[in-house]
Amino acid sequence: MNNTETAVALFTLVRKEIRRFMRIWVQTLLPPAITMTLYFVIFGSLIGSRIGEMGGYDYMQYVVPGLIMMAVITNSYSNVASSFYSHKFQHCVEEILVSPMPSWVILFGFVIGGAVRGILVGILVSLLSLFFTKLHVENLFVTILVIILTALLFALAGFINAIFANKFDDIAIIPTFILTPLTYLGGVFYSLDLLPDFWRMVSMANPIVYMVNAFRYGILGVSDVDVYFSIAMIIFFVAAFTVVSLWLLHRGVGIRQ
């Protein structure tokens, strides 16, 4: 395929993925917005008023960046995991594999589509948060960079999950038993400075800590970890997951058996 044909193929896959979740926006965009609104009401307005300040900001302002990031992570992951596995289940992925499209076009067609959904949900949650608190973006570049990288990272993770999944239940295992605990323990609702030294060190092994704190730095200008190191960690994981995904796709793992 020449460059023009490759660009058309990538654009077509991305457009297909975006149209897929936009066609059922009541199921893909509305539920996470409602869920995050409940978080705002319960953790921000009700509990937050009793907690007071955290990190130099009132509790509601402090948790909003974490909740936005949680919505981006969850939706980027679930979109690609469900979409690619559906292609496997319906045996239409074979038509994509026998096409002249390079493996990286197939991968990023699904990944970009999933990342777009995650970012759209993040924007929607951000707009809803304005009804509960004031947001002032301290560093726009860091904010945009982190949310894009994080959406791409978890879209890639969802792709890997879909490759190894043998049934629809397998798609829910990782989010339920790994992704959700890591997110809740990733500094979304609290500052790492509140933890004892031992548990603070344990938390540093959680990759979501770096994403949440880097995004919080972009919004509020505060972070429990070094921002440049956090961004480097995210880029490293994106690169690693991309290499693994391409290798799995090239070998046909979970697809060509």
Image: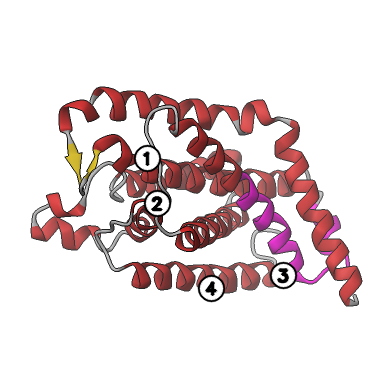
Which tag, 1 or 3, sits closer to the chain's start?
Answer: 1
Give the x, y percent position of residue 127.
51, 35
Q: Name the residue: 17% across, 63% down.
A: 201
Q: Which residue is mark 1?
A: 64
Labels 2 & 1 near each other (Cβ < 8 A): yes
Circle 4: is it few (<14), some (14-19), or many (20+) Cα within 10 Å?
Answer: some
Q: Which mark is residue 239?
A: 4
Report the quarter where the C terminus lies: bottom right
- How far from the left and from the top, in percent, is residue 245? 61, 67
**Residue 59 locus on image (x, y percent):** 25, 37
Q: Which dot marks residue 219? A: 2
Q: Quadrant of residue 2?
A: bottom right
Query: Is disc 3 placed on a helix, strand or loop?
Result: helix
Q: Nearest to the eye among marks 1 and 3: give it.
A: 1
**Can residue 91 be spotted in the picture?**
no
Identify the disc placed on residue 104: 3
Q: Amino acid at mark 3?
A: Trp
Q: Find the distance from the CA under tag 1 to the CA under tag 3.
A: 35 Å
Rounded to the nearest angstrom, the CA distance separating label 4 from label 2 is 25 Å
